[in-house]
Amino acid sequence: MKRSALLRVAAAVTAMLLGVTVSTACSSKADTGSKGSGDVSTDIGISGDTITLGVLTDLTGVFAALGKDITNGNALYWKSHKVCDKYAVKLDVQDTGYVPQQGVQLYSSIKSDILAMQQTIGSPINAALAKDYEADKIVNFPSAWGKTLTDIPGTGVPGATYDIEMANGYDYLFSKGLIKEGDTVGHIYFEGEYGETGLAGTKFVAGKKNLKVVEAQIKATDQDMSSQVSQFKARGVKAIVLTVAPGQTASVAAAAQALGLDVPILGSNPVFAPALLQGPSGPWLKTHLYVAAPVSGFDKHPDVYDAYAKAFPDAKNPSLGVILGYGISEIMRQVLDAACKDGNLTRQGVLDAFNGLKSVDTQGLLVPIQSFTLHKSPSTQSFILRPADVKGGAKIVEDAFEGAFAKELAAQ
């Protein structure tokens, strides 16, 4: 999507979500309606029958397309759901541009008006806000799966962390005979929490299968991957592994195709966007790219796609980020409903409800989540997706599963 079109969509989403002015709620009491007896305690982020949740997303940076779809998924969910059958939910949407300092500043500007964070995109931004979220007793669902994010109280990583996700991806490649013990693999990864957690998964599997790893660390702003792919070919890699953004994936595909490097590509879940299929390397990606992911596909959730298409008729070619946004909103509703039933919709009450959540079921939107336990991956399962000419741009080739590498890694 062109930048101007993306900004128009982002503005429309923001306008829809922020139609009512949000003000800091004073400590108050509210009737629980049909979902409880007595009063519900509140403090910040609730005004009358409206709960305000924060969103720190990326609408103009390297994950702009994904950020738009996740945010639209959030908006779509809350358009038809309430908390405790009483409270409507509004989203205060802010665009970080995938810049951590900008995320910190934007959070500071909205924190006195929100009850919790429905979405914070990017491991670096979540990490930068860790101390603030803990101090403010904020429940937050990151659109990120960095391992250190599980160390933040109240932060619920919606699936397997990147190292475990990558381990499941390797399990799939080995099971299909696409790589074998002793092979050389090349791994391109972002500097920082996102890339380094994915690389940790590669290193773990390498230790188990005697793989030789050629590492290539890049910045999120680096776009041309031709030198890295040339190095991989010279080193005889049998697979390319990516923990990057879709722009880098497209560059890797173009370079590998040009060099005749006919090897599979394994990616962490943010590496793909449907728009890649419209580029010159689209056909090549369909036959080479495998993505380990925490989200299901539109083929299994056609109702979500149909509702999305109706709500956002101008937003074409949605990614499975819509399902992620819808799924993490469902988890937030479960947390808020539990807090409401406990009679405590204060930040502390919501945090207590979050900590008590077990065996989270999103009806197959996301992988099964055991619990949000500090210092532990919430899930050990992943879907395996492949690019295809289907709604969402990717099809499921392996349902959510726990591979042997992931099981062992999670037990450490």
Image (tube, helix red, strand yellow):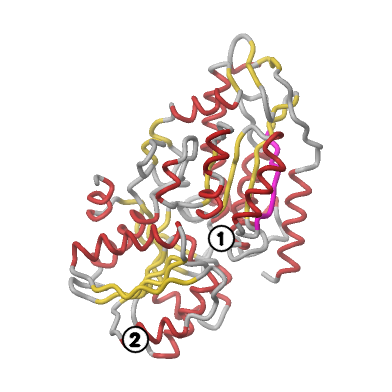
Q: Residue 116 carries which label?
A: none
Disc 1 + disc 2, Cβ < 8 Å: no
Q: Which residue is drawn at 62% across and 42% down?
A: 77
The count of marks equals 2
**Mark 1 or 2, nearer chain start:** 2
Q: Quadrant of residue 2?
A: bottom right
Q: Residue at x 67, y 23 (%)?
A: 43
Horizontal side of 261 relative to 340 (left or right) equals: left
Q: Which residue is drawn at 69% across and 47% down?
A: 93
User: Can you say whether 210 is above or below 252 in the image?
Assistant: above
Residue type marked 2? Lys
Q: Mark 1 points at which residue?
A: 319
Q: Where is residue 142 in the image (x, y as percent from the top left)?
A: 52, 47
Helix, strand or loop at label 2? It is helix
Q: Where is residue 230 in the image (x, y as percent from the top left)?
A: 40, 87
Image quadrant in which the N terminus is located: bottom right
Helix, strand or loop at label 1? It is loop
Horizontal side of 282 relative to 104 (left or right) equals: left
User: Can you say whether 142 is above or below 288 in the image?
Assistant: above
Mark 1 packing: few (<14 Cα in 10 Å), some, or many (20+)?
many
Instruction: Please tell me whether mark 1 or mark 2 is closer to you in this view.
Output: 2
Residue type marked 1? Ser
Question: Is residue 94 on the magenta stretch?
Answer: yes
Q: Position of residue 189 (x, y in %)?
A: 43, 68
Q: Quadrant of residue 59?
A: bottom right
Mark 2 packing: few (<14 Cα in 10 Å), some, or many (20+)?
many
Q: Residue 233 carries which label?
A: 2
Q: What is the span of residues highlighted in magenta in the rendered image? A: 89-96
